Image (cartoon, grey):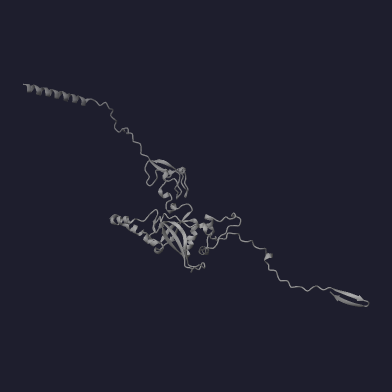
Amino acid sequence: MNLTKILAGLLLVLAIVLAVGAWLLSRPSSRPVAAAGAELPAAPKAPAAQHAVVVAAKAIAAGQRLGADDVKLAQMPAAIAHSFNQPADVVGRTSVIAIAQGAPLFGQQLLNGLALQLESGQRAVSIAVKEPMAAGHHVRPGDFVDVFFTLDGKTDQAVVDTQTRLLLARSRVLAYGAASVENPPPTAAQRQEQEDSASNVRRAREGQNARPDNANTAVLAVALDDVQRLTLAEKYGQLTLALRHPDDTSVPDAALFAALPTVLQPVAGRLAKGETLQAVDRSYAGMRFKDLATGAQARNAPRPAAAPLNARATPRPQTPQPPRQQTVELYQGSTAQTVSY
């Protein structure tokens, strides 16, 4: 009896629950139904990400050194590959080509290479090298070398004795063969690693070809005043590179030796008394190999003025002339006599 009452109560509760559910489902929705074909309002979009890019603040000429006011930071909707995102990365560098205002700056538009390794007043000069004359090809980019100059005395350009002397002291090597201070040759460990990796076989071969053992040229950082001496010595003599320790900073005292004369002489009166040609002016005036080989004394004194034409004529020897005779006639009576004196 009790079980029957319990089942009846459960069925009654279930019927009530079902009735309430049916009533809720039959209620009309309170939300407005969009008409057919009507567009739903778009959800708000997140702001697009911005990327900082260094651009030209104004037109930049080719060969111009960039200052802080030449560039600025601009926001771009997308990242630009190989560009700069900090003005400090480009300030102080030199443009290779002209850059329009507002254009992004790229690494290939700015000067790179050995020119940036030179100090003020220096020039990069290439010379031919051979293994016996270049420390057995043990020279590396960044080393310091002494350049010796040898003459065998058989040159037709000047009568000189066989000689060897120091031409340039402590010259920095910027490049040796295919290797340079910006692209140094791989070390033995790096070459071994490249050779052991099958994916880097080509790089290993290129690295092998770039070894200084195959070098036939060297690029030296040379003071402007020494460029002519180096080029003349290489043409008419033999150069030897002597490797030196980088901490050895000793150099000859040029003030102890007379300056070599120049090919071109300055116009008289253009230089102050005791003043000589310097730097670019002296290089422009040139140098003779004979003076380099013989160490001729400098003669910058002005040439003597030309003598007048009448002063240059050689006087003719004068022949002594006999004394001029005078005559007089004397009359004595009817006779006349002529007397010379």
Residue 189 image position (x, y, % from top left) = 31, 55
**Residue 172: percent from the left, percent from the top?**
43, 56
Q: Quadrant of residue 5?
A: top left
Q: Is residue 20 above or below residue 235?
A: above
The front one of 189 and 32 is 189
Direction right: furthest residue: 333
Outermost residue to the left: 1
Looking at the image, can residue 328 be seen? yes
Task: State the count of labels.
Answer: 0
Asked if 4 appears above or below 334 in the picture, the reply is: above
Q: Which of the image's four quarters has the C terminus?
A: bottom right
**Residue 191 on image: x %, y %:** 32, 56
Q: Nearer the viewer, residue 25 or 140?
A: 140
Q: Is residue 283 visible?
A: no
Q: Specify the quadrant of the image occupied by residue 281.
A: bottom right
Whole-percent x, y for residue 269 in the image: 61, 55
Q: Residue at x 49, y 60 (%)?
A: 229
Q: Residue at x 52, y 58 (%)?
A: 256
Foreground of the two, 301 or 21: 301
The quadrant the N terminus occupies is: top left
